[in-house]
């Protein structure tokens, strides 16, 4: 009972917070909140490759697309259960989407991760575009029109207390965000994570110490692709529509910006930058009311990113976590 008490209290707290947000916000703000978790998972997963393993991948959107399309194909062709049974169903579907995206990551990473630097970036960008163009020409997946009418998370009736669609979606998003953070965090604390870090610091020295650097890079790439597929599954359920136009290389660029802006090798930094990347453009959207309809949103957004990179080239957190910074501040003050 003690073991399950904390998770139950946490789940109850999340349920209360989700219900309160659902009652106090409109659908636009709710969608931004859900996209925040999608971007967080996408950024954390890419950080494993770009930040902790020291590689440079530009094809992350392709794996997000795989996860989104797998989820869309399954949920639109097979009936979705009602009630509490729907939650395990959606978790299983998203897990399957992640596994298939991870398989794609393995077959993409096997030949490409033998390259380094700019060559790796170009190859992964090419594979990402191959996935998008292939989906664009597959009539089974709707071609250029994509797949619509993807089911959202259902309302759940708990004996008179109804959990709204947004609340179940938020619980679903928080669940996968915690899983992503915990898996990557524990992986980095293991021997595999030390292999990733050694490849980042000095690949030649790592090979001299007997580490199979290609295997380590592929492992990081597969895990990263798996969680990119999970992010794609969340995206499909939250938007109810997917098309190849949603997964251009600009999505990969956004993921890279999250990693670089937050700090290469900082989970806290990626989560902070995911919040900035998601919220800042939406805050600036209202500027059109004061500029006579001229959209200066992306100009100001780009200038803000440039200034941050000039003033803080190592990213907001560098390679540190917020716990490390706080511990350092406490020790210096004493």
Image (spheres, rainbow, N blue to C red):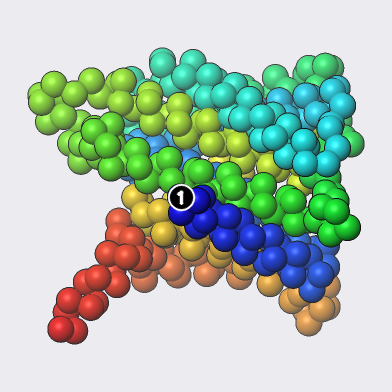
Give the number of callouts: 1
Quadrant of the image containing the C terminus: bottom left
Q: Give the answer, above or below, for where 116 lies relative to 176.
A: above
User: 115 or 4, which is in the foreground?
Assistant: 4
In the displayed image of the protein, which residue is found farthest to the front? 1
Residue at 59% across, 47% down:
175
Q: Where does the image place residue 167, in percent across and percent down from the top left? A: 75, 57
Residue at 84% across, 31% down:
80
Q: Where does the image place residue 100, in percent across and percent down from the top left? A: 59, 21
Residue 288, visible in the rendered structure: no
The residue to which callout 1 is attached is 3
Picture quadrant of residue 291: bottom right
* 254 sits to left or right of 232: left
Residue at 23% across, 78% down:
330
Q: Where does the image place residue 139, in percent across and percent down from the top left? A: 84, 17
* 82 sits to left or right of 180: right
**Element on which disc 1 rests:** helix
């Amino acid at each position: 009972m003690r073991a399950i008490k904390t998770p139950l209290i946490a789940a109850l707290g999340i349920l209360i917070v989700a219900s309160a947000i659902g009652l106090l916000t409109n659908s636009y703000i709710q969608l931004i909140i859900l996209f925040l978790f999608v971007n967080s998972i996408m950024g954390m997963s890419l950080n494993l490759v770009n930040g902790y393993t020291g590689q440079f991948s530009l094809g992350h959107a392709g794996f997000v697309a795989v996860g989104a399309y797998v989820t869309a194909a399954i949920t639109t062709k097979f009936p979705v259960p009602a009630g509490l049974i729907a939650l395990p169903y959606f978790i299983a579907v998203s897990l399957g989407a992640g596994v298939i995206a991870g398989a794609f990551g393995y077959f993409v990473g096997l030949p490409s991760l033998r390259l380094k630097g700019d060559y790796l970036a170009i190859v992964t960008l090419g594979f990402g575009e191959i996935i998008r163009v292939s989906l664009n020409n597959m009539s089974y997946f709707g071609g250029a029109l994509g797949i619509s009418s993807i089911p959202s998370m259902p309302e759940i009736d708990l004996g008179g207390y109804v959990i709204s669609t947004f609340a179940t979606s938020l619980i679903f998003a928080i669940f996968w965000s915690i899983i992503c953070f915990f898996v990557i965090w524990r992986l980095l604390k293991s021997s595999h994570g030390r292999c990733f870090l050694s490849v980042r610091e000095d690949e030649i020295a790592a090979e001299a110490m007997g580490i199979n650097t290609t295997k380590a890079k592929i492992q990081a790439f597969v895990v990263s692709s798996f969680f990119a597929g999970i992010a794609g599954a969340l995206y499909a359920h939250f938007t109810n529509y997917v098309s190849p136009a949603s997964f251009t290389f600009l999505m990969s660029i956004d993921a890279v910006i999250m990693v670089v802006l937050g700090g290469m090798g900082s989970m806290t930094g990626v989560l902070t930058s995911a919040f900035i990347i998601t919220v800042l453009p939406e805050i600036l959207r209202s500027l059109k009311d004061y500029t006579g309809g001229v959209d200066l949103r992306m100009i100001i957004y780009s200038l803000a990113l440039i200034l941050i990179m000039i003033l803080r080239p190592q990213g907001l957190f560098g390679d540190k976590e917020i716990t490390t910074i706080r511990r350092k501040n406490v020790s210096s003050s004493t």
